[in-house]
Image (cartoon, rainbow, N blue to C red):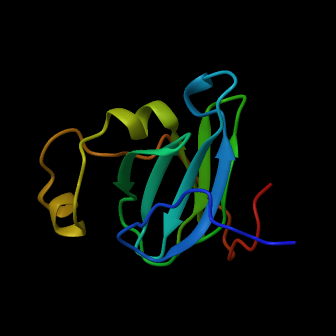
Amino acid sequence: AVVSTQSGHYGRGTACNMCIGQFGSVKDKDFICVQSMDGMLSFFEQDSFAFSRFLPQFLIPGPLCYVPSTDTFITSSSGNYIEAYRYQTLAVSTQSETKDQIKAGTGKRLRVDWTSNIGDNVVDLK
């Protein structure tokens, strides 16, 4: 069997985690979310890049999962918190090219929808 590349996207960071789903409650289309080592979530709709957002107060990548029933991405932070971000919140927040732009606080900032301190490192989310 021969494996060949059908399409490719080159991001600005090193990919760490990814998940797939019908983000935004869109039917019959699979989207991909890629979490990079620097805390950026990049979204790809079918074969094209859609947008990217840096997670606030990000230090190290943790597990990432998508919950279709609430259209939410759940990940963990280095402070032993589980954090949830709705797809719509990610989509309408202001684009930030760098972490310094996030600290400047211009535009509509990305905010966590809910968070919970679990008091331990998160190894996996399902």
Q: Quadrant of the N terminus?
A: bottom right
Q: Nearer the viewer, residue 57 or 118?
A: 57
Q: Nearer the viewer, residue 12 or 2?
A: 2
- Toward which corner of the image does residue 97 lie, by quadrant? bottom left
Q: Quadrant of the C terminus?
A: bottom right
Residue 79 seen from this side: no
Q: Residue at x 52, y 72 (%)?
A: 15
- Most extreme residue toward the front, as rendered? 2
Q: Residue at x 59, y 34 (%)?
A: 23
Q: Nearer the viewer, residue 81 or 125?
A: 125
Q: Position of residue 105 (x, y in %)?
A: 15, 52
Q: Position of residue 66 (x, y in %)?
A: 67, 45
- Counting labels gives 0
Residue 16 seen from this side: yes
- Toward which corner of the image does residue 91 lie, by quadrant? top left
In the image, residue 8 sits, relative to residue 88, either above or below, namely: below
- Toward which corner of the image does residue 2 lie, by quadrant? bottom right
Q: Residue at x 40, y 74 (%)?
A: 13
Q: Position of residue 89 (x, y in %)?
A: 41, 35
